[in-house]
């Protein structure tokens, strides 16, 4: 056993045991009996290390932290989420972006299935390493492919999207409005400063409003793409 340097006049060696060797230990024996708690040194260190303990006790749930120079202080542990639900998140929960094959949020026994960030402001879900559902930055939903409409299933096999388009006319006997390309008329409407004669779908892709007199009128169409 190596030497012990201590300024204390009394050392109770029956409660304190030092060992020497590859796994040198400091053991603190229990009040009565053979059991103990202790510390074990690494098998090898590159240089001597001495830690200085804090002068006072820390607060509840704090941990010891080093400054990298051997000075230990009490610190509040980073993060505040416990898996058993007893402590909830008090800040933003952030994860890596991930990919379809390796989602940022996944499962221990199924790591190619989960949630990931497919691009800027794009939310995606994958299974078996392949993208299955996506919500893009415009709020469009795609199942089985990137969406081109509000709801796009099978990469264009089924598309569902709608819009409201308007056109304002002045001093005309009739006024028309056209749906954007790829959409057909679901319904038409008209409003104006004078009496309206009638309004109707002009074609499958446009609406028309006829007036009794000239004035300012607005014709609108509800258009949809349902493939």
Image: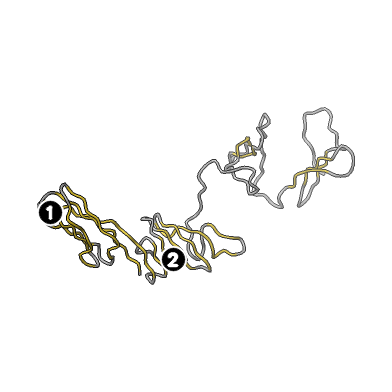
Q: Residues within 10 Å of mark 2 (few under 14, many from 20)?
A: many
From the viewer's perspective, tell me whether residue 226 is left or right of residue 46: left
Q: Residue at x 65, y 48 (%)?
A: 84
From the viewer's perspective, tell me whether residue 19 is left or right of residue 196: right
Q: Which residue is mark 2?
A: 143
Q: In which quadrant is the C terminus drawn?
A: bottom left
Front one among 138 and 183: 183
Instruction: Report x, y in % for residue 120.
Output: 39, 55
Farthest residue, direction top: 9
Asked where in the image residue 74 lies, by quadrant, the reply is top right
- Indicate how the structure is coloured in the image: secondary structure
Q: CA distance from mark 1 to mark 2?
A: 48 Å
Q: In which quadrant is the N terminus drawn?
A: top right
Front one among 188 and 8: 188
Label 2, secondary structure: give it: strand
- Say the numbered circle drawn on residue 70: none
Instruction: Report x, y in % for residue 190.
Output: 22, 53
Label 1, secondary structure: give it: loop
Q: Earlier in the sequence, mark 1 or mark 2?
A: 2
Q: Residue at x 24, y 65 (%)?
A: 205
Q: Nearer the viewer, mark 1 or mark 2?
A: 1
């Amino acid at each position: 056993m190596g030497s012990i340097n201590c300024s204390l006049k009394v050392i109770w060696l029956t409660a304190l045991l030092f060992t020497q060797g590859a796994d040198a230990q400091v053991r603190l024996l229990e009040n009565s009996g053979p059991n103990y708690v202790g510390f074990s040194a690494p098998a090898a260190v590159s240089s001597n290390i001495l830690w200085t303990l804090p002068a006072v006790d820390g607060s509840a749930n704090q941990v010891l932290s080093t400054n990298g120079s051997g000075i230990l202080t009490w610190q509040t542990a980073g993060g505040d989420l416990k898996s058993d639900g007893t402590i909830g998140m008090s800040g933003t929960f952030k994860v890596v972006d991930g990919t379809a094959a390796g989602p940022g949020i996944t499962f221990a026994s199924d790591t190619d299935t989960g949630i990931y960030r497919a691009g800027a402001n794009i939310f995606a879900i994958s299974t078996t390493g392949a993208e299955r559902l996506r919500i893009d930055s415009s709020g469009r939903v795609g199942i089985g492919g990137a969406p081109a409409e509000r709801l796009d299933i099978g990469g264009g096999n089924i598309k569902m999207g709608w819009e409201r388009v308007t056109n304002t006319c002045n001093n005309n006997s009739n006024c028309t409005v056209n749906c954007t390309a790829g959409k057909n008329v679901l319904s038409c409407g008209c409003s104006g400063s004078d009496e309206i004669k009638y309004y109707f779908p002009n074609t499958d892709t446009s609406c028309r409003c006829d007036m009794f007199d000239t004035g300012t009128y607005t014709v609108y169409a509800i258009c949809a793409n349902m493939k």
